[in-house]
Amino acid sequence: MSERYDAIVVGAGHNGLICASLLGKAGRKVLVLEANEQVGGAAVTREFASGYSVSSCAHLLYQLQPQVQKDLGLKPDLAADGMSTVVLSPEGNHVRLNEKQVSGVSEEDAAEYQHFYKRMTRFADLLRTYLNKMPPRLAKNASKSDMLTLAQLGFDIRRLGKVEMQEFLRLIGMNIRDEAVERFESGLLRGAISLDATLGTHLGPRSPNTILTYLYRLAGAHGKISQPKGGMSAVTEALAHSARNNGAVIRTGMPVKRIVIENGRVAGVKTEGGETFSSSLVVSNADPKTTIMNLVKARNVETQFTHRIHHIRSKGNAAKLHLALDGLPAIDGIEKREFGDRFLIAPDDNYVERAFNHAKYGETSIKPVFEITFPSFRDSGLAPAGKHVMSAIVQYVPYELREGWSDKSRAAFQELAIDTLAEYMPDLPDRITATELLTPVDIEEQFHISGGHWHHGELTLDQFLFTRPVGGAAQYAMPLDGLYLCGAGAHPGGGVSGAAGRNAARAILKREAVV
């Protein structure tokens, strides 16, 4: 083999870069291999039409963990910090909210939202503590450390107080729809909360676990939304700079073909180009299915384990729509300054649930829900002078479309999505000069994510904490000596959080000597 490394990280997504940086900081000799020509994984900025650039998949920053920023000295340059959310109404009676207050609703709803937000962020803070820890092992061979973590979790839940403890335990497995309907009269407010709880998932507001996914969203910055200057690549390029400063070598355009196994443990990697690199420690930022089924191969691990990996639910349900515009569209009731905010199309919780119904049967929603930004409004470098970019996440768009994804089905859904947008922005179709639609199949292909799911696996109680990615492999180490996961498929999950990469590095440094 060629030059030997203490660790090889497969994939330069944000978690892989964080893991590599922390391993390098601890004195390890680290190599990072990225299949694409650009670091960042799904958190990248790319040109999609001449002069128009956009954050291709992840497009907003709201989950980056404070501890990650502290450990790496990371201070993202933001074009917008603390963006408000505008829930659009076709009649112009929009609801506006930020992480602490809401307007455009009744006084009762406004007061109840503050109470709701205070409770949810308190629960999210409890969750965040354990997102940034290695989950304890639930087994006969659990260590003293595992038992202490479990005991601490129980103690922290009790510290909420009797009433709040009971409420936390009541809510954690519930659906967001019941909680929203119980508390709020405004359909637009219920729609916004429903969308935030289900964005990027194969879940509807009535699905169990959507309180959990809502808390997961809040566990970064309490719902505070930011837009990095230069798009999401600004964040991942800063992480790559940190990794290089800590001694890591990063090579792009180097897809890994397989993880080399010798005598029952990893021995390095072989690239598609035929190069080999030696290490007895390989850390995969790829999703669990890609790692085990494609890079390791099923024959190298136990059948029962591959069976569990194979059955991880990881089929994406969100598309990304990018529009190059010759100017900002007109939206009734929206002032120009508000185009720097985040817009939602989610008129109420029932609308969101009906949109989800189609995806259950392999169909795209006939009335999708949207998260929309105009990133060029705050960051003029993303579009030519006087022009603009629209970036939208569109749900629900199933990975396994019943009729199959083709040029025809892609064009049909793109037309439907633009027609839906035009109900709120009538002149939008006339302003479009170029379009790009990325379905989950496109996301899978372009960002090497099995199923095109940005969490690398559905975020539900049976695929969370102790059982993420699967039971018996929740502490980043795979059942193959020297192999670890550090990506979104590991605890705690996806989003531009960095917790998985940081946790994996800490677990590796605790368990592995320099090899």
Image: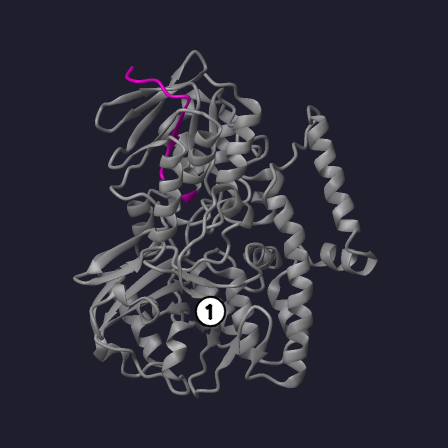
Question: Where is residue 107 drawn, in percent x and y?
Answer: 65, 85
Residue 5 within the magenta-colored segment of the rendering: yes
Q: Which of the pair 143/2 is nearer the observer?
A: 2
Task: Residue at the far left: name it.
Answer: 50
Could one spot residue 456 in this view of the protein?
yes
Instruction: Farthest residue to the top: give it.
Output: 263
Highlighted magenta segment, given as a residue range? 1-14
Q: Is residue 92 left or right of residue 71?
A: left
The kind of secondary structure element at disc 1 is loop
From the image, which quarter does the C terminus lie in? top left
Above or below 40: residue 353:
below
Q: For the N terminus, which image quadrant?
A: top left
Q: Position of residue 420 (x, y in %)?
A: 35, 75
Residue 308 placement, left or right of 238: right
As for residue 323 lying within the magenta part, the answer is no
- Is residue 13 something that shows in the picture? no
CA neighbours of label 1 inside 10 A, class few (<14), some (14 to 19), many (20+): some
